[in-house]
Amino acid sequence: MRYALAVVSLALGLFASACVTFPGAPAAVAPPVLAANALQTTDGRYLPVAAWPAESPGAVVLALHGMNDYSNAFAMPGAWWAEHAAITTYAIDQRGFGAAPGAGFWAGAEAMKADLRAAVAAVRDAHPGVPVYVVGHSMGAAVVMAASADASLHVDGVILAAPGVWGGSALPLTHRLSANLAAVIAPGKTLTGERAGRQASDNIDVLRAMGADPKVIKATRIDAVLGVVRLMGEAFDNADGVCNDALVLMGRKDDIIPLSAMEHVAENLCGDVDVRRYPDGWHLLFRDLQRERVWRDVAAWIDMREADHAEQ
């Protein structure tokens, strides 16, 4: 009887997975261009960009925010890196988030990966000869990992902060079945996450500001939940194909992504990997109360890599 129920559950999950589809990568019609406050993608869409320019940048950071967040996630570290580390930062509102097209709707992992590649190319064009690093927080880190596993991002290194990797084989089968079935039955129904009772940071002022910020999504469509679960699964299951030199940041108090999943990913990345574990770190590592320690570690890692390159 138990075996029969397991088979039925698996069949339902496979059926649901097959029924729920998301857009593929958009057709490229033009080269990407980085403007003062926007990225023109290869399909002609415009994604808002926030920038914190250093006077004479020794490196450039391209930053991708987490689920339901937007470019403002990097306002504090971006300003600090510009002033104290000669790093220029560009943060993008990814499709479906912030002020980007289709806010609140899942754009599809393929489109998000294509946008990342377009942004890297545009940043390199805007800063010829300057090293480029990609920082991804949570879902943003999953986009970076999934894209890198597909093919080289042609960047000098990646920083994965609280990587969103709770999907694929890291996620219990019952959770995957539930996400698939719910997205089939009620894709437009929204969830707030309040019942989960999880806390993203010890910085209560930041949490309150995010709660009052209209660009931060508060109610998530169920099909978007499925979309990010699939993206995280792609990142988790293909970690051994991510061969960029990487810095992985994780907080031991992270209440959003299981520490065991992040540790697994850190152990399976195939490039030169450095890991920073913060005993007092939560999920919003760049905005927690001990955030400046994280900012300094990122700047120091980039500086160390550039010093090593100069010696070679």
Image (cartoon, rainbow, N blue to C red):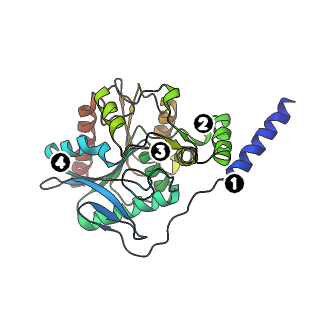
Observer-nearest of 308 and 273:
273
Q: Which residue is located at x 49 percent, y 67 percent?
A: 26
- Mark 4 / mark 1, whichever is N-terminal: 1
Cα–Cα span, label 2 and label 1 = 20 Å
Res 24 visible: yes
Amino acid under disc 3:
Leu
- Mark 3 / mark 4, whichever is N-terminal: 4
Cα–Cα span, label 3 and label 4 = 29 Å
Place of residue 249 in the rendered image (x, y in percent of width and height, measured from the top left): 37, 36
- Dot label at residue 263: none
Q: Which of marks 1 and 3 is in front?
A: 1
Observer-nearest of 42 and 128:
42
The residue where tag 4 is placed is: 82
Q: Which of marks 2 and 1 is in front?
A: 1
Q: Callout 4: helix, strand or loop?
A: helix
Q: Is residue 208 above or below residue 121?
A: above
Cα–Cα span, label 2 and label 3 = 19 Å
Q: Callout 3: helix, strand or loop?
A: loop
Cα–Cα span, label 4 and label 1 = 46 Å
Observer-nearest of 194 and 14:
194
The residue where tag 3 is placed is: 269
Cα–Cα span, label 1 and label 3 = 32 Å
The residue where tag 1 is placed is: 19
Q: Is the Cβ of the residue at disc 2 closer than 8 Å to that at disc 1?
A: no
Q: Callout 1: helix, strand or loop?
A: helix
The residue where tag 2 is placed is: 171
